[in-house]
Amino acid sequence: MIGDVCSWRWQVRVLSPKRLSQQLEAAREEYIRATVGVRKEQRVTLPKLVESYARDARLSPERLVDAVQRCLPESLRAAVQRCRQSRPASKVVEWAPYRHSFRYLLARDLAFPHLT
């Protein structure tokens, strides 16, 4: 489910088991595009949820910013690159609080097919 913050309507996206990997990849990129920001061309604002992912995946700040940058449109990608030119990736990232209006729910049989 993806929440529309302005109107508080919920959108439901149904994922199919055959294309689950591709659909989750697309959803990850959409999430990054929707939540990443650049502040004063000095800081890259990332959602706190990404910090947990980066820690679990053992991504260095440089690799994390690289991965995020690949998901962004060209204008934001260029802004992130300008941030990185002035300071190291570890000093560029700023963590934004978790947005409770944005979430994904997986049906039990999709998440745990061996239990059905």
Image: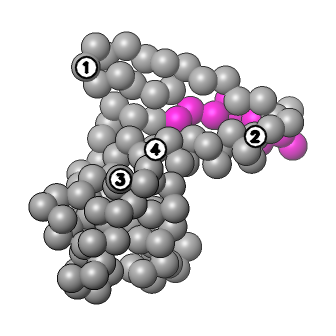
Residue occupied by mark 2 = 20
Residue type, numbered disc 2: Leu
Outermost residue to the left: 40
Q: Which residue is mark 4?
A: 31
Where does residue 99 sit, x and y in percent of width and height?
A: 30, 41
Q: CA distance from mark 4 to mark 2?
A: 16 Å
Secondary structure of residue under mark 1: loop
Q: Which range is magenta? A: 104-115
- Camera sees residue 116: yes
Mark 3–mark 2 CB contact (< 8 Å): no
Q: Is residue 109 left or right of residue 65?
A: right
Please name the residue shown 34% across and 71% down the image: 81
State the mark number for residue 26. none
Q: Is residue 107 magenta?
A: yes
Give the secondary structure at mark 3: helix
Which one is earlier in the sequence, the residue at label 3 or at label 2?
A: 2
Determine the CA span between mark 4 and mark 1. Answer: 17 Å
Judge whether residue 84 is colored magenta. no
Q: Earlier in the sequence, mark 1 or mark 2?
A: 1
Q: Position of residue 80 (x, y in %)?
A: 32, 66
Q: Identify residue for label 3.
A: 75
Q: Quadrant of the C terminus?
A: top right
Which residue is identified by label 1?
A: 6
Q: Nearer the viewer, residue 89 or 9?
A: 89
Q: Earlier in the sequence, mark 4 or mark 1?
A: 1
Label 1, label 2: how far apart the Cα atoms are: 29 Å
User: Mark 4: which amino acid?
Assistant: Tyr
Q: CA distance from mark 3 to mark 1?
A: 24 Å
Q: Residues within 10 Å of mark 4 (few under 14, many from 20)?
A: some
Q: Of label 3 and label 4, which has the lower sequence position?
A: 4
Q: Tell me which amino acid carries mark 1.
A: Cys
